[in-house]
Image (cartoon, rainbow, N blue to C red):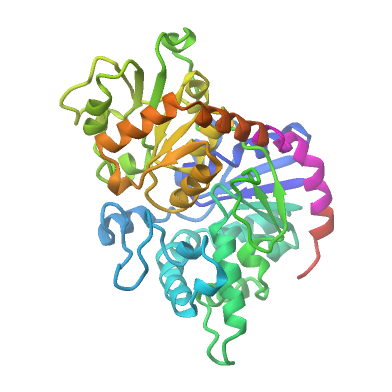
Amino acid sequence: MRVLFATYSEKTHLQPMAPLAWALRTAGHEVLVASQPELVDTITRAGLTAVPVGRDHNLWRAARRFLTPRMASVDPATYRKVRGVKQPPFDIAGEPPENISWSHLKAGYDDIVPSWYKMVNDPMIDDLVGLARAWMPDLVVWEASTYAGAVAAKAVGAAHARLLCNLDMFGVARGHYVRLKAARPPGRREDALQEWLTDRAARHGIGFSEDLAVGRFTVDQQPDSLRMEADLHYVPMRYVPYNGPAVVPPWLRDEPRRPRVCLTLGSTSAERFDGYAVSVQDLLDALSDLDIEVVATLPEREAGKLARVPGNTRIVSFIALHTLAPTCSAIIHHGAFGTATTTALYGVPQLSLPERHDAPFHAEKLTRQGAGIAIDYREATGETVREALLRLLREPVFRERAQTLREEMLALPTPNDLVPELERLTEKYRGSDV
């Protein structure tokens, strides 16, 4: 069969999709990956066939101009206080239904549709539909906010599925919105997402159905203990780490002489904004007298901001986490999906400093599961991080629970295992209507 992967140009969205694309290729299926021109080199470096569609979006340029450096646009007078920056309408994803109001969700969708969804999808929708009509895929797999993929699939009668590179706060928030909308009086059921998708779909001769928002089914890379679910069809898959070209340096081949602790705060803050939400210098100073080896992954620009590098710290500009994690006793990170899930896959206790998107939710679930500790990034000082790290290193229960989580993840179907199920679901949904 022919399978089209679709994502707007964001490498952290492509990378979790790559292993499934590889699995389908090695099973003999034809695979294309469509994205905006900016992502083409990243796609081809992953060994996949790229098709540039549309033009590049300007999401991050707009974010730098109109949002604060931390993307903390939540008005505390309007939205309840939460740990981390949980952006409406997704901040309700962990709430019981009785705590969720229509006005809150509506305000969130009214903001997120023009400020995110339109901005990243509109530049690629028409060209992606054109590609689908020329190539006629049987299945379209789309990143959960790349609704252009759903529109393209519907335009040609292909089966289509979301592939999550996050907890499913999208599906949960949407489920609550649909529920509350149905209880509204006729004529007062505004739906910014539906209105936008209805307009874009109509341009290609198709009508709106709810699968344009949530897919026919959803591939979820989280184990049961961490999963966030709506009333949708989920297909579990084991997470396979991939974050670009990987090289094992000579020092990593030797067994660490002291407990090794990785400090990684991700690439988005360094690349898109003005640095990290926490002080790297304060963290390194606070850990400097401990009998540990700290490996801090810092881009050159961020490393250049340091006034000093403690003797127990090694600074590296980049290293693939799946090569480093198995040698670590603990990992301190920013809570992003790829970092947190890779850490969990290798059974390493983790200290999460979550900031935004689904990271606070993920950190809370990890804490409840017992595999780590979470500290809101606004409370992450050298002192609080040091105290939490010492607990991770000294209390065996964290390692035990992290190993249990690893076993749960290893029990999930691999991308290769999933291929026959995708073939079956494609046959079921291809050419059907909701």
Q: Which corner quadrant of the image does residue 413 belong to?
A: top right
Which quarter of the rendered picture does the N terminus lie within? top right
Q: Nearer the viewer, residue 418 or 396?
A: 396
Q: Is residue 85 above or below residue 307?
A: below
Q: Magenta region, mostly helix, strand or loop?
A: helix
Q: Nearer the viewer, residue 339 or 206?
A: 339
In the rendered image, residue 176, in percent from the top left (x then y), is placed at 58, 71
Number of numbered markers: 0
In the rendered image, residue 15, in percent from the top left (x then y), is placed at 54, 39
Residue 140 left/right relative to 105: right
Is residue 87 magenta-colored?
no
In the rendered image, residue 275, in percent from the top left (x then y), is placed at 26, 41
Q: Nearer the viewer, residue 14 or 407?
A: 407
Q: Nearer the viewer, residue 22 or 41?
A: 22
Is residue 417 magenta-colored?
yes
* First to last magenta residue range: 409-425
Q: Give the residue displayed 53% in from the left and 27% down from the top.
A: 399
Which quarter of the rendered picture does the C terminus lie within? bottom right
Q: Is residue 43 visible?
A: yes
Q: Which corner quadrant of the image does residue 184 belong to?
A: bottom right
In the rendered image, residue 283, in percent from the top left (x then y), is placed at 26, 31
Q: Is residue 263 visible?
A: no
Q: Is residue 79 above or below residue 186?
A: above
Q: Give the residue displayed 55% in from the left and 67% down from the top.
A: 96
Q: Give the residue displayed 35% in from the left and 17% down from the top.
A: 292
Q: Which corner quadrant of the image does residue 259 belong to?
A: top left
Residue 415 left/right relative to 200: right
Q: Give the residue displayed 61% in from the left and 57% down from the top.
A: 149
